[in-house]
Amino acid sequence: MMFMLQMTQAAITLPLTDPVLKFLLILVIILAAPLLLNKLRIPHLLGLIIAGAIIGPNGFNLVLRDSSIILSGTAGLLYIMFLAGLEIDLGDFKKNKWKSLTFGMYTFLVPMALGTLVGLYVLNFSMLTSILLASMFASHTLIVYPIISKLGITKDKAVGITVGGTMITDTLALLVLTVIVEMAVGDVDDGFWYRLGAAIILFFAFVMIVFPIVGRWFFKRCEDNVSQYIFVLVMVFLGAYLAELAGLESIIGAFLAGMALNRLIPSTSPLMNRVEFVGNAIFIPFFLIGVGMLIDYRAFFTNWDTIKVGAVMIVVATVAKFVAAWMTQKTFRMSVDQRRVIFGLSNAQAAATLAAVMVGYNVILGETPAGEPIRLLNESVLNGTILMILVTCTMASFSAQKGAHNIAMNDVSEEKEGTGEHQERILIPVSYEKNVTELVNLSTAIKSKKNKNGLFALNVINNQASDDKAFKQSKKVLNMAVTTASATDNVLQDLLRYDLNVANAIISVIKEQGITDLVLGLHQGKGVVSSFLGNMTEAILGQSNVTTLIYRPIQPIATVKRHLVVVPARAEKEVGFPMWVNKVWNIIHNSGAKAVFYASEDTTMYLKEIYKKRPIEAEFSSFDDWDDFLIMSREIKSDDTLWVVMSRRERLSYHANMSRIPNYLNKYFQSNSFVLVYPIQAGETNNRYLV
């Protein structure tokens, strides 16, 4: 016993050297901070920074900020920027690109002007030091982005504008850092500007063009979950490294990598869930704790210059970022809560600010008569920067949390008003292992965001089967469906049913469970036969009256570039129109792909009215000649999915040539995924449904 006690005492030394104890302590902090601070309504991000200051070398010296902390923190910082690029709505970003540019210039020029003047006339710094100090105020880190993401408002216009503006202001601020350092050491010539410009252009072009091509190729060919996640990490760090080669900071590369892979990792996909989970659970908390370890509270009590410089930096950074947020709000007529979100996202100083101050601190311009180094940024600025990081992160967390919470609550209220009493329940009959994953992925992409428990997977066993083989196979298929759905944080209820007839079983479950939508799969190897989609599908369509989607997956939904939606004339006059439109809108919004609607002029008018209220990335083309349907074979490309809205006979939108669509799909669209949509019809259906 004494020997064990001595060994324990010897093992627990400060700072901790045992990797198991270090990791355990950090995990306890990551676990406890949200639980404790949520009760006090304090953002847990702030708690992690404070915890880092307490356990760090300037606190109780429990853990050193060694290479392991720096490595994990760097990964966390890159993760934050990557998630920001990954979750940005590219359609909205393109639509608001000039707004993002305007905000980016506001939040760059205002701090640069104010910071330079304060550096020159209040702190009495040199011109180069003042400009470098101002660039630190201009840059910001999306450190509170996890709060925005958790509250589910990443698609809000204010968030999109701020994230887009972040790329602009951080890029410009880091370019200022590069130029000022080169000027300080006397290495700026004409060749420097040419080299820098060429490197930046090549870097942006390579990431935004090559990364999506490589990503689409990989995701088409690799279905292994672990390999997909590792591939994402490789692309993040590759983008970061390429940015460094181009003379930029790595965070710009991570952000661009997120934008490049944006459409390949839909928000409803299992891969997105894994990316967010690992980042928020491990990497990002390590970064926040590492930032806290930099805080040296003793310097604030022993050095008046540190307090003075820190106070000035806090005031200037906060005022400048608030003015930029206020100007953006007034320019684009945004709400107060949106201004709070913009200010919260843009006020937090961390990554780029730390990079700038550390680079400036390490640049030595000369020596004093006493032999002390004259630095581009002195120790007072270094310590003041740490104080500024703590205060701005605190203010940013409270501002972003308040604004995001109010916006989220308003969105919930509007959604409740819009949905009324309609309860979405989606049934997915599954029988083949090969297409289970894609059927579930389609269902999670078309469903409502608030629908977390309305998915059902059904497998039917012939009730005359006596062996256990059929039962085991059915359970295996159902478990695959449940696992796929759970990876996206959705609950899928598995239903196993014995029946002589598969169609009867499906129709019975539709009635018993109150199903509103049916997603049927078409096995790739079976093709489309002349008698439409087979007897089973015919029977289901003839005896059920729910929105039915018949899906043939050729490639993963995440790799689809465009969804081509062919709509019959007068479809808007039928009762099922809002239901299927909502499904199509959801998949476009969730996947980030582009929609191209082919419809008559009257139908297009209705679709454009919906587009005004719920903007997505979409185009509208005139189409009303079903006798010339094969024109679509010239419009469709290899990475497109074709959606055809069908109709039953004797309905307003029915066209005689619709009966040929299955043969057309089988003959001319073999390399494309397609979805046949059968809307709800008024009243009960009968066997005269065939189209």
Image: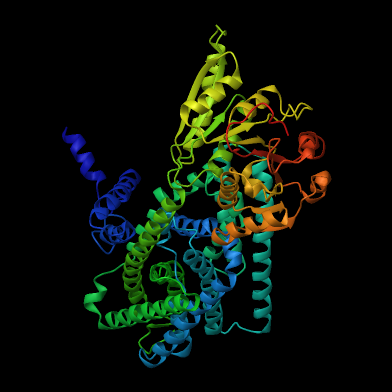
Q: Residue furthest left?
A: 2
Q: How many marks?
A: 0
425 to 359, vertically: above or below: above
Q: Foreground: 210 or 66?
A: 210
Instruction: Give the quarter of the figure containing the N terminus.
Output: top left
Q: Position of residue 338 (x, y in %)?
A: 42, 68
Residue 438 visible in the current orientation:
yes
Q: Foreground: 474 or 588?
A: 588
536 to 167, vertically: above or below: above
Q: Position of residue 347 (x, y in %)?
A: 40, 71
Instruction: Give the quarter of the figure containing the C terminus.
Output: top right
Residue at 60% from the left image edge and 66% from the top image edge:
95
Q: Position of residue 520 (x, y in %)?
A: 62, 31
Q: Foreground: 491 or 602?
A: 602
Q: Foreground: 482 or 170?
A: 482
Residue at 41% from the left image edge and 80% from the top image edge:
323
Residue 369: quarter of image: bottom left
Residue at 58% from the left image edge and 29% from the top image edge:
544
Residue 66 visible in the current orientation:
no
Q: Position of residue 371 (x, y in %)?
A: 38, 84
205 to 20, vertically: above or below: below
Using residue 671 as the reference point, say whether residue 521 is left or right of it: left
